[in-house]
Amino acid sequence: MRTVQIVLFRILQAIPTLFVVGTVVFITMRIIPGDPARVVLGENATDEQLSEYRAANGLDRPLLLQYVQWLIDMLSGNFGRSYVLDEPVSKLIAAQAFPTIANALLALAIVLVLGIPIGVYSATKVGSFRDKFVSGAAALSGTIPSFVMSLLLIAVFAVALKALPSGGFAATGAGFAETVSHMILPATALALTQLGYMVRMVRSSVIDELSQSYVLAQRARGYGVMKSVRRALRNAAVPLLTVSGQSLGLMVAGSVIIETVFTISGLGQLTINAISRSDFALLAGVVMFISVIVISINLVVDIACSILDPRLRRAQ
């Protein structure tokens, strides 16, 4: 299957997923207790005022018509207007998406920079105390809640050492150093949620490769272990890319807790504000936007894996 066909095939596969996600979001927003008209106009609004608001915003139409119109708006990139702030949801998302995406990308870089060499080191020392220590630490890192890790990082690096800011995101126009300094702690907290998984995946891939009979024969003839490790990493390109994509998607989706702890005005904070204010239009827009990001990441990863691995192309 040629590259263009692979891309089209994967895009067609992603469309039903988006449709299902959109349907679930719409239904969830409609079954959550609360009246958008009452939220906006307040408890003292008259029945006439409530009826006028519902009619103006299409909330009095049959549910099926609301659903169809909502899907059409989503496909056109129109996420509606915030009930509380009375601003376009797309504008609010655009204003606060950068911190979330930037922190997630930096966190992915940390995961790759640390996870690959640590995994390789552990694989080359398999069975030793150092290997067991690394494996145990990797397993433990995935069990610590992200908010606990965030508070620990703040306590050590912001409060005790006073080396890094405890929260917030650098203002527009700030220098590169200031921007990065504000990103280090939240990005590290995000990275630690996925680092252990990356270490275990790399370790497993390298151990599998080093146990192959041809590698053992090469080692017997005096070949260095690092040459085998480099080959193992090349062969692990597809699972490495898959894990990286999954980790990036999870870190974007998991930004709610991190941004709350570090008081970052990103998509996570926007989600919390929408929930606390019962702003269902804003909440639905943010959830859909994050879902589109996650699905798009998986789509790109699937296409890249299919191009890199001929076996996957033949399977399609």
Image: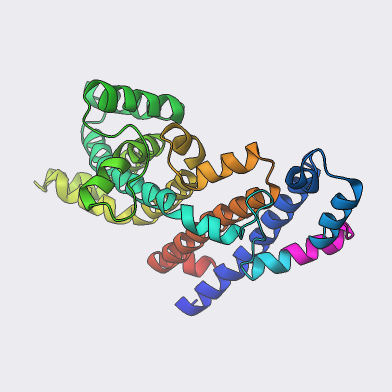
Q: Is residue 206 left or right of residue 61?
A: left
Visible residue check, residue 211: no
Visible residue check, residue 177: yes
Q: Position of residue 284 (x, y in %)?
A: 66, 51
Determine the image quadrant of residue 115.
Answer: top left
Q: Position of residue 155 (x, y in %)?
A: 32, 22
Q: Which residues are magenta?
A: 60-70
Q: Position of residue 278 (x, y in %)?
A: 69, 41
Q: Nearer the viewer, residue 162 or 138?
A: 162
Is the magenta region chiefly helix, strand or loop?
helix
Q: Is residue 141 left or right of residue 225?
A: right
Quadrant position of the C terminus in the picture? bottom right
Q: Is residue 136 above or below residue 243?
A: above
Determine the image quadrant of residue 142.
Answer: top left
Q: Residue at 66% across / 64% down in the picture?
A: 74
Q: Is residue 151 above or below residue 19?
A: above
Q: Nearer the viewer, residue 314 or 192?
A: 192
Q: Residue at 15% across / 44% down in the picture?
A: 225
Q: Position of residue 216 (x, y in %)?
A: 21, 44
Q: Nearer the viewer, residue 288 or 204?
A: 288
